[in-house]
Amino acid sequence: MRKAIIITLSILGLLLTGGAIIGIDVYMSYQDYQANEDAFDISEPTYVLSESNLSAEITVFVYTPPLGYIPKSADVEVIVMQNSAQYCDPISFRIKIGETVRVDFTVTISQIDVDRLKVGMSLHFNIQVTATPVYLGIPIASLTQEFDEFFLIIQ
């Protein structure tokens, strides 16, 4: 009986300690976010068009400041739109919070748009980006953030 009480109290102590550590980290993360709110940024997209004009390699840089002590990440989704319609499948990736990450993705260009590029027309894309924080491996959907749209003109 006494051994069971000691084990129970040990487990309770570990749970309370873990809860306190997570609580402190959440508080520190919030304070870091308030102090560095403008440090979350996504660069303007740049592109390199393939020789055949069948695809464009798009590059963006994602800047995030460190938050708290426990490592965190974010699930990022990029949607490329043209004329209010989704142009290709969404691009999803995970980044670590506190790092600057270069993100490269390829967009396949439709034959109609390839023909437009050949006659000197340009393609206009809207790029929508959303980020969902991930804490201890669990995505927190209620904190999903939508960034301002980016505009990309391919000529």
Image (tube, helix red, strand yellow):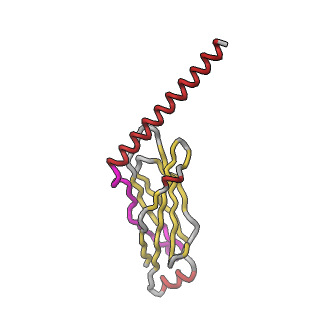
Find residue 32 and report its image quarter: top left
Residue 122 place in picture, x, y as percent: 44, 81
Q: Is residue 12 left or right of residue 155?
A: right
**Residue located at (44% from left, 69% from top):** 47
For this orientation, the residue located farthest to the bottom is 119
Say whether residue 37 is left or right of residue 83: left
Residue 53 lies, with reference to residue 145, above or below; the image says: below
> Given the current orientation, which residue lies at the most extreme top position?
2
Q: How many marks?
A: 0
Camera-side residue of 122 and 145: 145
1 and 137: which is toward the camera: 1
> Residue 51 in magenta?
yes
- Residue 64 drawn at (x, y percent): 40, 51
Q: Quarter of the image for the N terminus: give it.
A: top right
- The residue nearer to you, when weighing 121 against 12, is 12
Q: Which residues are magenta?
A: 36-57
Q: Is residue 54 magenta?
A: yes
Residue positioned 46% across, 57% down in the render = 145
The quadrant of the picture occupied by the C terminus is bottom left
Q: Position of residue 124 (x, y in %)?
A: 45, 77
Q: Position of residue 15 (x, y in %)?
A: 55, 29
